[in-house]
Image: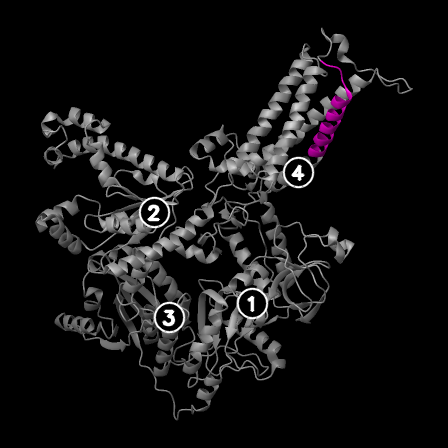
Amino acid sequence: MNFLSTLVTFENLHEVRRLCHWGPVIALSVIAICSTMAIVDSIIWYWPLDTTGGSINFIMLLNWSVLILYNYFNAMFVGPGNIPLGWIPENQLESQYLQYCRVCHGYKAPRSHHCRKCNRCVMKMDHHCPWINNCCGHLNHGYFTSFLLLAPLGCAHAAFIFIMTMYTQLYERISFGWSTVKIDMSAVRQFQPLMPFSVPAFAATLFALGLALGTTIAVGMLFFIQIKVIFRNKTSIESWIEEKAKDRIQHYQTGEEFIFPYDLGSRWLNFKQVITWTGMPKGDGIEWPVHPKCHQHTLTIEQLKQKADKRVRSQVQYQAVEHYNGACCPLSKGIQTFFRTPCTEEPRIPLNKGDTILATRGTKWWMYGDKVLNEDQMRVGERDQQENQSSVGTDSPASPVAVAPLETENRDGPEFPVLFASNMSMFTTGILVLTSPIHTLPLRIAPVLSSAAQLVERTLYVHLHPGLNLGSGSQQRPAFIPPFVDLSAIITRLYSNAADICGHLDIRVLLTNVRAQSGSVTNGPFPSPQPLSHSPDVVLTDFPLQDPGQSHQVTQCLQKYTGRCYVCSPSLPSVLLHPQLMKLQENVECVTEPEGKAEPLETYTDVVVGGTFDRLHGAHKTLLNISCLLANRRFLIAVCDQAMLKKKVLKELIEPYSLRVQILEEFLQDIKPSLEVEVVPLDDPFGVAVVDPLLQCIVVSEETKKGGEAVNKKRIENGLPALVLHEIQLLKDAHHTETEEEKISSSSLRSRLLGTLLTPPKDTSHLPPLPYVIGLTGGSGSGKSSIARRMEALGAVRIDCDKMGHEVYQPGAAAHHMVLEEFGSDILNEDKTINRRALGKKVFGNQERLKALTNIVWPEIAQLVKKTISQAREEGKQVCVVDAAVLLEAGWTDMVHEVWVTVIPEDEAVLRITERDGVTAEDAVRRLSSQWSNAKQVEHANVVLSTLWEPEVTQKQVLKAWKLLQKRIQPRQ
């Protein structure tokens, strides 16, 4: 049975705790009462077991009980299937279409939702069922539905037994006064009933009958609801999402056609997605078969749109006019409020008279939203704030009391709602339209970016249109901006300030409208709206609003202007940013309009740049944006491939070439789609720049200027004209540490990845949740043992596999005998211990003999490791660290929850080995070459660490890794 096999994998029967809840206690009690009474009644009174019908009836009752319990326990213990903690899609670009779970520290896969009761993101979540004390989702939906079908059938059968028992036993004792048909089986019994049908027996049977009939009706209705959504391949949550999608489309009149992506067009095909003969559904819970007109992220994109729409609606404020204590069913607020209380587990928010509420939706009696904290409440601190305010993005019943609107906007028809930057939630992607004049724009960049960062959480596009007047009342159209020197400085400042203020944002300065206007151009820079890689869900502007009464006119104009430039929703929310900074106003007043025209920027037909472009950051974007400013026709980018990465710091963490190219092409397609972009691999310091005759300019930085001069020298040798060197300044990194470069660099970003979760852990459902086992490995001399000792000092149980390797060679151990049989007794010392040096000579250079040895020793070490982990579990330890050099080679990853790898450069490893072991450099190199390379080990790593720097730096890495680990294991506790 599946649930039994599931329980066996939990050595401490951790999941059995699900039974200790009122839901399973009641459900199992009802099953026990109904089945026990039905069996007792059939044995003693009805139906006689000595008849054929009675035997069949008894067997059916037993079958109902077994099948009901089988499906019930499978639904409970198999569970719905959880999204791995820290999950990231294989194609990281797809993360823009997904919501991020801050509890599970990963993205929510399509159809998954976070359950606050289970504290995990659940695959294809339907609902959290208190009767099984678990979620109903991907893996257990079939079992749960089968239980809902079998329970009413079994209870209906039991109810029939109860009715017939009472009828046959009471027929001769009660005179009804009219003729009736007698159904009495006593005549066919060979013996009289084992006991008389007494008053207690009658009471027990009557009670069981009530339970059976009530269960039949209630659970039967639940089955009808479940089978209805299964036939449409939906969950209860997805049905709600579909309803909200239709409401959103109708409200905004967008003209969209919403097609539910998982309805395969046939009830039978939909049914087979959930119900199978094996009991396990089809699919992995991550990817799903979809409608031909849809794709994997159709529904998740709709969820993001609804989330943005909810933020819009939440800007209408209400004020409580009565006190509310947070009661779930407040009878004192009226009978309608009492009977129409929301059937949700979301928290009710206590309110005092005068409290302000941001509402997202509601009925006449209940509102859903968040409470706005006043200044006094804000001082109380984050802990009290969490007690009084529901989490962002959760619809929480705010109050059942009467409320009076403070501020509303006209939402009838196509008019657009006016939003302000205060008290707003986060949008995923935004467009920032900068309208300030060129001479004041540099002073506004920092405060405007700071305000925008409070609203946008992932991608912020920046559209430059200095002098744009959104308050004139006339329809403003996009215009060309000529490339000039000051614009290059503004772009540099934008990316520099963004790195300091909002480093979490992906800033992209759009240049489609930046070029010298040609006489042949009649349609402006946007003949048709430009599509962007990330669909925007808000547009922001720094336009100064002089008259608050113009806000609606300005936002309408901004929406229409943005719609002419970029592909976006016609109902795109508009936000007016008002950085209220007196210092800013004083600075602006003292700036005078520069005399004369701006200095033009010389441009070229073909421009080239080169670089690694690992983890695209602000300095990269500055280089690319300015190169796009300079290029009129073609932009050639040489991206470093393997040969050019050998001397890079933490080269093992550099993104694959294909991914770097993909990100580059997407970025350039956004900022200037009219350019012909050509990306080529760079395998030597010169690359294609020294042979391409069409190139005119190369863009360099202060530190790569000498490389540009070397390229020109090579071009002259090849008979080609020298390239114009356009130098850009380096961007300072305000957040750099003592071990990092002062400039923004990929090396610094890679070093900040040390200790963080790079890839989500694999499925470890076969392991007990605690202790959480870390497999720590790395090459010789990498410092993994020192890291293991540091983790031991933090509270982890250290399991030294090297020490265990010595133990298995000791006389009396199983491996000791097997090694002697395989390699002979000439490897023994005088004290009967194995001479490991002599044994090493026999296996060195002989792969077959080495494999024979590892096949003996590694399984024995693995058994010792498992034994130690079990002991740690009994002692209540939370974390174990398996320090094993051969963790990956031995295939021990199935014993651990995460793999941590330590890396250092080969030169440093050779130096450490020679100093520690007194061997030659050649021997050290041979030892390293016989092991897995750093790159190969990192491919299997969840977390990477490095001991390349001072011990203090290593300690900081370990502390960071430990802190993040505690967050990941917290849901398991």
Q: What x and y, as percent, mark residue 616?
A: 34, 64
Residues rendered magenta in the picture:
195-216
| In the rendered image, the vertical position of residue 420 relative to residue 52, given as above or below | below
Q: CA distance from mark 2 to mark 4?
A: 50 Å
The mark nearer the N terminus, 2 or 3, is: 3
The answer to whether the residue labelled 4 contacts the one labelled 3, judged by CB atoms less than 8 Å apart, is: no
For the point 19% across and 50% down, the residue is 781
- Observer-side mark, 1 or 4, equals 4
Q: Secondary structure at mark 3?
A: helix
Q: Residues within 10 Å of mark 4 (few under 14, many from 20)?
A: some
Q: Which residue is painted at 75% across and 58% down in the image?
A: 333
Which residue in the rendered view is the most extreme toward the bottom?
595
Query: In the picture, residue 52 is in which quadrant?
Result: top right
Q: Which residue is identified by label 2?
A: 796
Q: Secondary structure at mark 4?
A: helix
Disc on the earlier residue, 4 or 3: 4
Q: CA–CA distance between discs 1 and 2? A: 51 Å
Disc marking residue 224: 4
Q: Return the residue at label 1.
A: 572
Mark 1 lies on a secondary structure that is loop
Disc 4 to disc 3, how far (Cα)?
55 Å
Q: Nearer the viewer, residue 949 or 936?
A: 949
Q: Is residue 425 visible?
A: yes
Is 727 inside the magenta-drawn segment?
no
